[in-house]
Image (tube, rainbow, N blue to C red):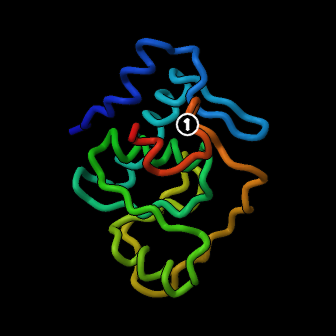
Amino acid sequence: MAVPDPLLAVHARRTPDADALLAPGERLSWAELHARAGAAAGELEERGVRPGERVAIELPAGIDFAVALHACLLLGAPVLPVDLRLAPAERETRRAAAAHLVDEPLINGVRPHLPKRGLTPFRGQAPSGNAYLKGSGPFRFRACLGS
């Protein structure tokens, strides 16, 4: 059962072509963010993510993080952001608290049923700049939720 993401749905309906996210070399309109989050939510669901199951997101702050976050919100799956600046042991502890791990951009970037040991470390590159939610300043987890 999908749970609507009010912020995303409202903006996608009211201002579909307006900028939702801006990052170095990329922009997404509200309609594009809604479409990408919907596709990513479909991938998460196909891989076994169910409403109420915690999903750890271990991605740099940016568009891929926002897409994964909104995908989880669409599914009703709580999000546990894993800060890439944490020590490896702390990141592993956070990841272990979740049923699923997203550590690569969706689509095809979720690892269901996270093992307790033998985790593959994050393989992505550090972002060259911050992503921005239109009008919010540097992208932060709370900004994506509309707070």
Side of 26 relative to 32 (left or right): right
Residue 42 higher or lower than 55, as above or below: above
Q: Residue at x 43, y 12 (%)?
A: 14
Q: Residues within 10 Å of mark 1 (few under 14, many from 20)?
A: few
Taking 1 as reference, is 86 above or below it? below
Report the residue at 73% width, 62% height from top.
Answer: 126
Look at the image and tell me in which quarter the C terminus lies. Answer: top left
Residue kind at label 1, given as amino acid type? Ser
Q: Nearer the viewer, residue 49 or 27?
A: 27
Q: Is residue 112 above or below residue 28?
A: below
Residue at image coords 48%, 81%: 92
Q: Position of residue 133 (x, y in %)?
A: 57, 36
Where is residue 30 drawn, in percent x and y? 52, 24
**Quadrant of the rendering where the N terminus is positioned:** top left
Residue located 31% across and 62% down the image: 54
- The image shows a total of numbered marks equal to 1
Q: Is residue 80 positioned above or below 76 on the image?
A: below
Say which of 123 and 15 sits in front: 15
Q: Which residue is mark 1?
A: 136
Where is residue 95, by image quadrant?
Answer: bottom left
Residue 13 is situated, as x and y percent measured from the top left of the image, at: 41, 14
Where does the image place residue 65, in percent across and percent down from the top left?
Answer: 54, 50
- Under circle 1, the secondary element is loop
